[in-house]
Structures are given as structure tokens and as C-alpha cells.
Amino acid sequence: MVASPLPSVDSLLRNDAAAVLIERFGRPATVGALRETLAALRAERAFPVSSPAIFDRAADALACRFAASQLPVFNLTGTVLHTNLGRAPLPPEAAAAAEQALRSATTLEYNLETGRRGERDDQVRRLLRTLTGAEDATVVNNNAAAVLLILNTLALAKEVPVSRGELIEIGGSFRMPEIMARAGAKLVEVGTTNRTHSRDFEAAIGPDTALLMRVHQANFVQSGFTAAVHPAQLAEIAHAAGLPMVEDLGSGSLADLARWGLPHEPMPQASLAAGADLVCFSGDKLLGGPQAGLIVGRAGLIRQLNRNPLKRALRLDKGRLAALEAVLRLYLDPDRLAGRLPTLRLLTRPEPDIRAAAERIAPAISAWLPGSLVSIESCRSQIGSGALPADLLPSAAVTVRGSEVDQLAARLRRLPRPVIGRIAEGRVWLDCRCLELGDEPAFVTQLYTHCQARAS
Ligand SMILES: *Cc1c(COP(=O)(O)O)cnc(C)c1O
């Protein structure tokens, strides 16, 4: 055995540099990092090595371990509600409400009048009743949870007929037949992929049928020789058999998007008016709020949902409830909604405005990437999250052409606040729809700082 030429952990800990790391990261993490660094150097047989070099390496490892994994990014993908980038950006009043609720004790389940236990979802329920005209409402973790809770409550060990045209898969792992199975409901497939008729549902109803369900065709469009049962018809068939009709709207918008020149998207109000007994939709898709699953409909059915023990497992925390409440309050004033709700503001942003932003930031990109071919092009943005898949919004992008577009996109992703674009036609496309005026200084400063850093 040859004595290790590396210092011991104990001797390193007596060093001033160790005190600096302990102050910043705590003693256990610092000791661990020094131990791992020494082990790595020993394995690499990388000695002799100076103490400062050991500390540098341990400090890098610690910085890595303590870095937040969720970073703010610039979403220049052209998809406004990008599921991988966290969907809807919250309005400031919602973020502030969430922060305040998270930082202190609150009246989450406390009634100030009586000094006794109150109802967690009360305020959101009241707002949803006002906004949709529903008898009652409840909220859970997300829309997938809403579907799960509805089926588990109303259709456990019973049958649920669904059109074959609506047995959808949406990104990740949400597949309607699988959710139904996990909820304990028996799926009864009716109709065909392209055509389902009223008589298909009528024939599928039997003694074990729990409810009739309609699922919004998110993420895809059917055209050609197709037929679907209208919600009002489906509700009529359900009610004639004494069954509830449930509609999963997916995105669903509380405001009529046609008002702002956007393509119409199904609204929960309209589903209820057509006769649906329960309607569920997402909080962080077109609604523009935090992740949540909103359920509106008949008071008796909502009561049953709230009594299911699963509701407790799927409920919202106080931060998200506060944020959701703040977002719903914005809907009370539709006239100012497009200015105040970021999702709607981004979706309704006029193309000339986006083009002007592209023109303002293009020089910073040229400066950051000398010698590259930077140009401004027309493009089309997507709403995302399954909403209106066929409708694209006219937009403008800064495009960068280079021999290695993948590397270029990777370099943009490696900036301190990563810039996420999209690669097409041998270029990187930076769709400027989601780069608002307030974001521009940070965007431009980052690029100039980084080209200076490389130059020096
Ligand atoms: C998006 C979507 C869901 C799931 O909603 P999450 O809020 O993502 O859980 C369920 N059904 C449909 C039709 C959807 O579009």
C-alpha cells in the first residue's frame, strides 16, 4: 500500500475554503462533496492535485446539487400552452395570491363568522357557479383527476358507453380507456371510429349503465364521412334512461373566444345548457390558470363527488386555490380579460405587434451569433394543450440559419435563462408571440452579456 498523495477530508475541513462552502451549503453536504471529490480523483489517479483545485471541483458539484431544476425559460416555440413548459403563465394577481397563501396561515378551511371549520373550495365554487350558471362546482388536481373522480364516484363496477371516435390519448399517459379501467368503470365502446349515432348509444344502455359520456376530441380533427351525437341529443338519450350525461371538455373556455376573433372552443356553459349534468375541464389550458380540474354541474352529483374519499387525495392546496380564485375573478369582467389574462393576451396578440418585437430583438441575436444568417419570417403559432389543433395563429419569428441547427438550438437552451425555439427547414425559429414587451430587456441583455463574456 502506498500512502495516498491526496489530503484527508479532515485536513481539508480545516481550510478557510471549507468554511466558505459550509456557510453556503451546510456541513453535511460539504463533507459529502469533499469525500466524493477525493474518491473521484483517486479513481482517476489524478494527482498530485492542489487543495484549491479540490475545492473548485467540490464547489462545482455542490452548486450543481443545489441548483433549482425548474428554470424560467423564454418560450419561443410558438406554442402558447406548452405542456412541457408549464402551460398557462399566471397573471400577476394570481401569482401574488398564491404566494401570500403559501407564506402564511389562511382561512383555507376556516369560517371567520362562526370561528369553526369552513369549506375549502367555497369561494371557487361560488365563482364557478356565477360564471357557468351551474348549480354547483368542485375542483381537483387536474382534469385527468376530474375524469377519474367522476367515473370512480358514479360508475364504479358499472358500464360507461363512449363513442369509438372519442377514445382519445392525449400527451404522456392519459388514455381514456386506461383511466376508465383505473377508475373501476367498464368501458362500453359504441359506434365506429368515424361515425357514431344516437341509436348506437340507445342500444348500449343496459341495467349496468352508470352514465353516458362524451369526450372532446382534443389534439386531432376528424373530417370526411363522419357523424357524432350532439351533446343535447346525448343528454336526451341519457335522461330518457334516467342516467346522467357527463362531458369531458378537455380545454374548454369560460369566455367565448370568437369575441376576440379566435376560433370558437367549446364552453362549459354551453354544455350545461345543452343538458350535460357534469362537465369537467382543465385549469391551465385555455382557462389560463394554475393546474387544476374544474367540475361543474348538478348539485346532487357534485355532493357525491365531494363525499368520495378519493376527493381528499385529489384536492387542491391553498396556493393553487388562491391562484385559481384570482384567475376566475378576472372572468367576471370579460371586457378587460384580454388585457389581464396572459394566455388570452398572448393568443390575441396582433401579428404586427409580434413582428415589431421580432425586429427589435433580431440585432441582439445577430450580435450573439456573429456570422449567422438572421432573418424575420412570417410563421404560425399554435394554441397547444389540445385546443383547436387545426387552427393556427398568424405570427412572426426571428429565424437563424446555420450549418449546425441542432447545436445552435442547444446553445440557446444552455443560456442562463434558456431560450426554447423550434427547428424546421434547416433553421431555428424563434416565434416572438410569447415574448412580451416586458420580457424584451431581459432577453436582449442576456444575449449581449453572453457575447461579451465570450469575447473577453
Ligand atoms: C387535456 C385533457 C385532459 C387532461 O387534462 P389535464 O388537466 O392535463 O389533466 C382530459 N381530457 C381531455 C379531452 C383533454 O383535452
Image (cartoon, grey):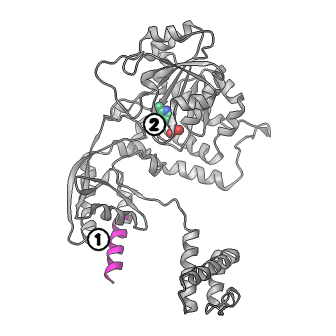
**Quadrant of the image containing the C terminus:** bottom left
Figure quadrant of residue 216 = top left
Label 2 neighbourhood size at 10 Å, few (<14), some (14-19), many (20+)?
some
Q: Is residue 369 left or right of residue 13?
A: left
202 and 416: which is toward the camera: 202
Q: Which residue is mark 1?
A: 368
Where are the magenta residues, as a range?
443-456
* SS type, badge 2: strand
* The residue at label 2 has a CB less than 8 Å from ligand 1: yes
Query: Residue at left 45%, top 51%?
Result: 85
Query: Residue at left 43%, top 40%?
Result: 385
Where residue 170 is drawn, which disc sits there? 2
Q: Earlier in the sequence, mark 2 or mark 1?
A: 2
The percent position of residue 254, horizontal first and vertical second, equals 46, 32
Residue type at mark 2?
Ile
- The answer to if 381 sits in the magenta stretch is no
**Quadrant of the image containing the N terminus:** bottom right
Figure quadrant of residue 18 = bottom right
149 and 136: which is toward the camera: 149
- The answer to if 452 sits in the magenta stretch is yes
**Disc count in the image?**
2
Q: Main secondary structure of the magenta part?
A: helix
